[in-house]
Amino acid sequence: MAKPVSIEVWNPNGKYRVVSTKPMPGTRWINLLIQQDCRVEICTQKKTILSVEDIIALIGDKCDGVIGQLTEDWGEELFSALSRAGGKAFSNMAVGYNNVDVNAANKYGVAVGNTPGVLTETTAELAASLSLAAARRIVEADEFMRAGLYDGWLPHLFVGNLLKGQTVGVIGAGRIGSAYARMMVEGFKMNLIYYDLYQSTRLEKFVTAYGEFLKANGEKPVTWKRAASMEEVLVEADVISLHPVLDKTTYHLVNKESLSKMKKEAILINCSRGPVVDEVALVEHLRENPMFRVGLDVFEDEPYMKPGLAEMKNAIVVPHIASASKWTREGMATLAALNVLGKIKGYPVWSDPNKVEPFLNENAPPPAASPSIVNAKALSLPVSKL
């Protein structure tokens, strides 16, 4: 039996019991639930990742819905417990839901929510930040200064790469990949090569228009190219950022063979999913190619890194913070809460989960809808006509 889990309770006499497995940023999400007669229980246990047993203890005998985190294992056991407690709603506070067995949720009639539409620019900004930090060796230089090793300017001290005029490669030109590409093209006047199964016409038009602007002002125009294969991007790009979905076809998309095709001084960025990169092969490549650099926000066996990665000076590693801007994290909490609330109240599902601005407007009540339910079709949930 799991030990009792410490909680913080809001609106103790509320009709509906909603549990959050973690404290989440902001208070709007709490207020929105309270306004709809929810009792909100927030787990305050000093434990980074709750076990299945911990969450079952939180669910208890009566629970209408749960807001959870992508570090939790939401499968048969948890959905069975939630169903027994009368619950019909669960939402990840995340856009991804690789931690959720959606088939198990369907079996027990539990709606599964996620939070897309609010992470695009924030995630792209971190990918751009890692690109610049890797190119200019900022983390290495920072550590050097803090260690008291700087005793004067030297011509070869922490020489990095100039981004202007180089080629940025994007693998997966969806919302985040395209936002990142625009930042790198406009911010650093880089040329673009991208690979995606679908043509990104909007992105191509943006780069074309910006190139024409530069040309009209006497500067060299930027260019774009849609690659016929991922290999083409690997061979040609100076900076490569990964933005694919994670499935069987993209597992270890970057491996020993693909790394060998990249330029010796290339920069690789991953803010998508950890298993897209074969981390063991990456460590070996970093060791053998000291001028090759990488920026990682996600890891293959998160929260752990493969042996040797932490020691690599040519690697920048951050703890899954791509969505960690105040506005985004508060927005994610709000969307997750409204996913659960919508199912409890019998609201329809919002028609476009990537257009969530009406839910985030603090000066007006949110629409009477669940922002994003990934298994809405399987559960035959109605779609909002708003």
Image: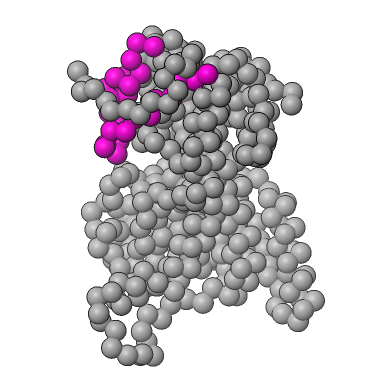
- Depicted 354 relative to depicted 188: above or below: above
| 42 part of magenta stretch | yes
Location of residue 275 in the rendering, given as x and y in whole percent from the top left corner? 39, 44
Which image quarter is the C terminus in? top right
Location of residue 192 in the rendering, given as x and y in whole percent from the top left corner? 62, 63
Q: Is 129 or 366 nearer to us in this picture? A: 366
Q: Based on the displayed image, in which of its 4 quarters is residue 355 positioned?
A: top right
Q: Residue at x 23, y 54 (%)?
A: 307
- Asked if residue 138 lies left or right of residue 91, the reply is left
By what rule are the colours in the image chosen? one colour
The residue stretch that appears in magenta = 37-62
Q: Is 25 or 81 nearer to us in this picture? A: 25
Q: Based on the displayed image, in which of its 4 quarters is residue 371 positioned?
A: top right
Q: How many marks?
A: 0
- Asked if residue 68 lies left or right of residue 370, the reply is left
| 144 part of magenta stretch | no
- Asked if residue 246 lies left or right of residue 184, the reply is left
- Depicted 172 relative to depicted 186: above or below: above
Q: Is 64 or 131 nearer to us in this picture? A: 64
- Asked if residue 56 lies left or right of residue 359, the reply is left
Q: Is residue 336 visible?
A: no
Location of residue 99 in the rendering, given as x and y in whole percent from the top left corner? 40, 31
Q: Is residue 88 visible?
A: yes
Q: Residue at x 66, y 31 (%)?
A: 365
Q: Residue at x 65, y 56 (%)?
A: 226
Q: Residue at x 33, y 52 (%)?
A: 279
